[in-house]
Image: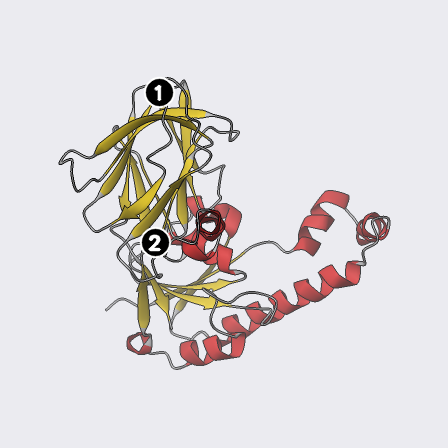
């Protein structure tokens, strides 16, 4: 077996972004003070992340390889099969990483226990350091979390851990035809729609954006993070003489897919709220959304 490589993923802190924008600490402090905030809050969060990163770096076995990457550079970073991914930050950072993985184990590390929900960043820095310090990849027990994948008819593909959004780039009215699985119609049920777009969510995403929509619809039961099922919802479907609003929610089981045929100039597809990293589908293109083939292996 090849020597493992630990890849530490983090994002720039608020303090670093403030210094990037204002050039000096004094100017950043003045900016925050003029808005009723103290730079000390940003400094404290920066220090907690810095401390967590130092703890993880120190725990990596001496014979392992080591690399670091910031969130903004993930799309350009080459991951290998031997990598173990240590994500230090909030739950959303784990979701951002998931789309680039192909079975590598992920250790979610919370630098601010109590400040984050800890759904995906389940380890304190010291607990993660103990896991890494043992130097035994075989000791890492993983839970497979369902992912969702959207595929365009030209082969372009995008995966997400929480949800995939399909709609207009500015969330205005999106026009398309939707085909959903149906027990009574072998080819599925189809409806032309104009809406604010639709989301297809995993069980992990069912605690976020999807949860708020489900609550408004009367509290539909949603999948759990490990269920091989997806929940989908159309947002604000508009009934008109040529568009309907009856096909607006459902569950996709294993092997089932939601098909969206674009009926406007272009629609976008993005995952986990990363709007800049998206696919664009033009008139007549078909988008297929279904269970992802690469679940996230989250270390528990």
The disc, 2 or 1, on the residue closer to the chain's N-terminal end is: 2
Categorize mark 2 by other alpha carbons within 10 Å: few (<14), some (14-19), many (20+). Answer: some
User: Which residue, given by chain and number where applicable, does mark 2 sit on?
Assistant: 101
Q: Circle 1 sits in a helix, a strand or a loop, which is it?
A: loop
- In the image shown, does 5 or 33 lie closer to the viewer? 33
Does residue 129 sit above or below 286 in this rendering? below
Does residue 70 sit above or below 3 in this rendering? above
Give the Cα distance between marks 2 and 1. 32 Å
Mark 2 or 1, which is nearer the eye? 1
User: Which residue, given by chain and number where applicable, does mark 1 sit on?
Assistant: 263
Residue 276 image position (x, y, % from top left): 49, 36
Residue 289: quadrant of the picture: top left
On the rendered image, what quadrant is the C terminus found in? bottom left
| Residue at 17% in and 42% down | 183
| Residue at 28% in and 76% down | 138
| Residue at 53% in and 65% down | 117
- In the image shown, does 294 or 132 lie closer to the viewer? 294
Q: Circle 2 sits in a helix, a strand or a loop, which is it?
A: loop
On the rendered image, what quadrant is the N terminus found in? bottom left
Residue 249: quadrant of the picture: top left
| Residue at 82% in and 47% down | 31
Residue 38 image position (x, y, % from top left): 81, 59
Residue 69 image position (x, y, % from top left): 49, 54
View extreme (left): residue: 186
């Amino acid at each position: 077996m090849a020597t493992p490589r630990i890849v530490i993923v983090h994002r720039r802190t608020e303090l670093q972004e403030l210094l990037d924008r204002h050039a000096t600490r004094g100017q950043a402090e003045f900016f925050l003070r003029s808005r009723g905030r103290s730079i000390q809050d940003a400094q404290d969060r920066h220090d907690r992340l810095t401390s967590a990163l130092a703890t993880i770096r120190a725990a990596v076995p001496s014979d392992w390889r080591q690399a670091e990457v910031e969130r903004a550079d993930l799309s350009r970073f080459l991951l290998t099969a031997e990598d173990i991914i240590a994500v230090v930050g909030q739950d959303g950072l784990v979701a951002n990483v998931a789309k680039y993985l192909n079975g590598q184990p992920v250790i979610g590390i919370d630098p601010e226990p109590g400040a984050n929900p800890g759904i995906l960043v389940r380890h304190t820095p010291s607990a993660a350091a103990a896991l890494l310090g043992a130097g035994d990849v075989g000791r890492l027990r993983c839970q497979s979390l369902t992912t969702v994948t959207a595929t365009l008819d030209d082969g372009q593909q995008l995966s997400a851990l929480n949800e995939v959004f399909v709609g207009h780039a500015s969330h205005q009215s999106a026009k398309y035809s939707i085909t959903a699985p149906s027990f009574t119609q072998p080819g599925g049920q189809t409806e032309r729609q104009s809406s604010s777009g639709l989301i297809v969510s995993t069980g992990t995403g069912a605690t976020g954006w999807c949860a708020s929509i489900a609550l408004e619809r009367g509290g539909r039961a949603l999948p759990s993070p490990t269920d091989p099922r997806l929940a989908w919802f159309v947002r604000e479907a508009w009934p008109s003489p040529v568009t309907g609003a009856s096909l607006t929610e459902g569950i996709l089981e294993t092997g089932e897919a939601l098909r969206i045929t674009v009926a406007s100039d272009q629609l976008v597809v993005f995952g986990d709220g990363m709007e800049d990293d998206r696919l664009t589908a033009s008139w007549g293109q078909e988008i297929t959304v279904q269970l992802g083939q690469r679940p996230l292996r989250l270390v528990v």
